[in-house]
Image (tube, rainbow, N blue to C red):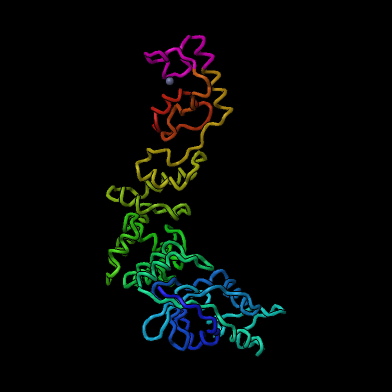
Amino acid sequence: MKATLRTEITVKQICDGFVYNELEGKGLFGLSGRLTIQPEYQRNYIYAADGGKRESAVIDSVLKGYPLGLIYFNKIPGDRFEVLDGQQRVTSIGRFVTDKFTIKDGDGNEQYFSGMPKDKRDRILTTSLLIYECEGEESEIKEWFKTINIAGVPLNEQELLNAVYSGKFVTLAKETFSNSQNSNIQKWGAYVKGTPLRQDFLACALDWVSRGNVSDYMSRHRTDANINELKTYFTSVIDWVSTVFTDVEKEMCGVEWGRLYETYHKQSYDPSKVSASLQSLYASPYVKNRKGVFEYILGGSLDTKLLDIRVFDEATKKIVYKEQSDKAKLKLISNCPHCAIGHDANKQKIWPMVDMEADHVAAWSKGGGTDIKNCQMLCKPHNRAKGNR
Ligand SMILES: [Zn+2]
């Protein structure tokens, strides 16, 4: 790969013919039409998010003469270029000189580019950028793009994968899963964490359909002309969750629904019973992990580990230990009730406190509470053999 450093290209040249597509949230062209600012493999424009602080900061830096960092262009046939890295900065500048947003002047007033004094406008337009022009095979450039240290907001995993496997499939997938105008996004957001702009929904859909083998899946489907399987699978998971669980709770967001769908979707559930169990677990002061409630219910309300049940406190354990041990010593039996009724050498063993664990006499899952009346101390081997039941 060949890289040439260019230091003479100015903001004015870059912004000549700048077009911003509001609908797609993309800066499209510049450099008199010779520059493609957002090639297919680039992410959407995100600097306008968080109230536009980032894009204002870019203009501030230009005005103050601060360095903007390196920008990378990929040279393509016909003396044309694509922005490989720096697209967010280039789009910020383009949007500003085309009056898409304002910055605060020295007096705190909002000001558009066209309303600025001429000397300030000239200062922006004559600023030259540090640009590396790269030339090489597509695969070589993509590989390199994966490893460069990217300024500003780092690319996340899915953005990198989109770059590496760019093509028809990624373009179509982004139209559905990375498009905040998609009316389904709000419904999906109840179950999937993140934002469409940062590819979180796409990453989730790919993770589910591929059972976690995202890059393998993207590579196999790279040239597909449709995303039917991806879309159908994702929709099936969401429909299944929202049918089984009629309640929408905030802890549902970000649960591994793909895995749960694979494990449980062939079983039948009564949504009103599911809802009743869910409400009672949500009301229980003993359930520490609400995110585990859904899998607990789907699995038949057996695996209490998922709920991270609040345990007996130290004071309770000490009292119960003392009571059990005192009685056991009088009767010459083990202070572990299970050992005491056994037939081995431990029949009369008095276990030290550190070798014992607290246990629910009536199983928590069958309504036993976490209070002293329901606490017994068992030796560790017996308690562990007992498991969750
Ligand atoms: Zn025991």
Rendered view: 32 above or below 302: below
Query: Quick one: 5 or 74, which is closer to the camera?
Result: 5
* Relative side of 273 to 27, left or right: left
The stretch drawn in magenta includes residue 344: yes
The residue that appears at 40% across and 15% down in the rendered structure is 341
Who's the residue at 45% across and 41% down the image?
Answer: 307
Left or right: 268 as drawn, with respect to 279: left
Residue 237 % position (x, y): 33, 57
Give the vertical position of 132 relative to 334 (above or below): below
In the picture, the quarter occupied by the C terminus is top left
Picture quadrant where residue 146 is located: bottom left
Q: Nearer the viewer, residue 39 or 291?
A: 39
For residue 341, side relative to residue 283 (left or right):
left
Q: Residue furthest bottom?
A: 118
User: Residue 11 placed where, x, y %?
Assistant: 55, 84
Residue 38, visible in the rendered structure: no
- Image quarter for ligand 1 equals top left
Image coordinates for residue 165, horizontal then vertical, percent: 35, 67
Q: Is residue 154 visible?
A: yes
| Placement of 98 over or under 370, stated as above or below | below
Among the 4 quarters of the image, the one containing residue 115: bottom right
Task: Specify start and end residues of the magenta stretch as a single range.
Answer: 325-350
Query: In the picture, which quadrant includes the N terminus?
Result: bottom left
In depth, the one of 247 and 5 nearer the eye is 5
> As drawn, which residue projects farthest toward the right?
107
Q: Position of residue 328 (x, y in %)?
A: 49, 13
Number of marks present in the image shown = 0
Inspect the magenta stretch and tell me whether residue 13 lies in it. Answer: no
Q: Is residue 78 above or below residue 144?
A: below
Residue drawn at 46 percent across, 14 percent down: 349
